[in-house]
Image: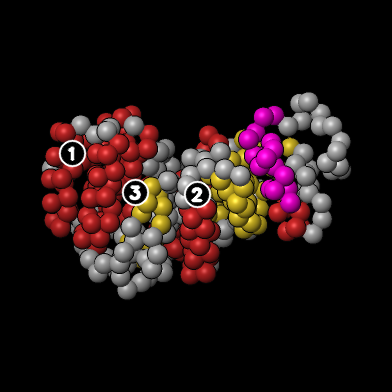
Amino acid sequence: MSLPSNTPQPQNRIPFVRLATDPLRTPLEQVVSDYLGRRWAVQEARDMTEFACHPCAILSDDSYSVFAKFSDAANGLEQFEIELAGLRLLRERSSILIPTPIGLVPVTGGCILILETVQAVERAPRHWRQIGQTLARIHQVKGDRFGLERHGYFGPLYQDNTPSGDWPTFYAERRLWPGLRLAIDSGNLPPGIIRQVEKLISRLPELCGPQVVPTLIHGDAQQNNFISAEDRAVVIDPAVYYGNPEMDLAYIDYFQPVPQAVFDGYREQMPIDPGFWDRRDLWRVWGYLAAVTVEGSSYLGRLTEAVQKYL
């Protein structure tokens, strides 16, 4: 049973979770209450910030739970709007599953994105296979040009999606050159690595492999951006555009290894070019540049190792 808002909360019921405290809690509760058509108030809170680049939590009134995340960035509202647009685009064009959007709430000092919680389960082999199958369904959608009609964000970083008819050009001009400039501006990139990345970019036409048809991709398909429910994989946090599908395959185990079942599930619906395994780190260079920009020098080793494979 939900407690009225004026009832004192048990001291150990809600640990300190930013989204469960005023002034963020009150507008959040109002939006969820309006969505449900009944009174909804936070009774339990689980902090999820360690899994994301924003303060976020799962909040519940004991019968209905939501996932909420907060941004205090100057363009936070725009970022969340683009995230929702990307989720809807994936659902509309590839019929994959996304969390139900509930609301986008401007608040003092930022904004909150609210989604219906997906009941996650511990992954068994079939759940890993479902992730691969879901990725393949996205990749079955083809386009005319690389890019998208609007820009996006890769985490907090601006992602230029200006269309191009050529993948090596798009990867160089829309991803690696901007990524290199951001990493240089962060002060985290030594001059020697800068020169190596510049040399790598100059070699892209001979490194990118066979020509590919512009393909709808998630854009940030690391494994934590899929939620495994009992009988399905649900997609979250996209950075959508039409690109090379090998980008998504390269990022699925970007942070942590994944079982072979992911790639087996993918192959049930789409082939994987044998040369992908040699190109995988080439596609990760963009992500490593972004990580160096945002996280600092801890990713320099991965970036250097990836770049040197192709020089």
Among all residues in the image, which is located at the extreme top? 11
Q: Secondary structure at mark 2?
A: helix
Task: Give the residue type that dot 2 points to.
Answer: Gly
Q: Residue at x 49, y 55 (%)?
A: 78
Q: Secondary structure at mark 3?
A: helix
Q: Which residues are magenta?
A: 15-30
Q: Residue at x 13, y 51 (%)?
A: 202
Separation of disc 3 and disc 2 at Cα? Answer: 28 Å
Q: Residue at x 37, y 42 (%)?
A: 254
- Front-most of residues 303 and 68: 68
N-term mark: 1 or 2: 2
Residue 65 sits above or below residue 218 on the image: above
Where on the picture, by quarter, is residue 150?
bottom left
Residue 291 in the image: x percent, y percent? 35, 39
Quadrant location of the C terminus in the rendered image: top left
Among all residues in the image, which is located at the extreme front? 108
Where on the picture, by quarter, is residue 241?
bottom left
Task: Give the residue type that dot 1 points to.
Answer: Ile
- Mark 2 crowdedness (10 Å alpha carbons): few <14, some 14-19, many ≥20: some
Front position among marks 3 and 1: 1
Is residue 24 rendered magenta in the image?
A: yes
- Disc number placed over residue 76 in the picture, else none: 2
Among all residues in the image, which is located at the extreme bottom? 144
Q: Which residue is mark 3?
A: 250
N-term mark: 3 or 2: 2
In the rendered image, is residue 189 in sight? yes
Task: Give the residue type that dot 3 points to.
Answer: Ala
Q: Which residue is mark 1?
A: 194
Is residue 16 rendered magenta in the image?
A: yes
Residue 61 in the image: x percent, y percent? 77, 44
N-term mark: 3 or 1: 1
- Mark 3 crowdedness (10 Å alpha carbons): few <14, some 14-19, many ≥20: many
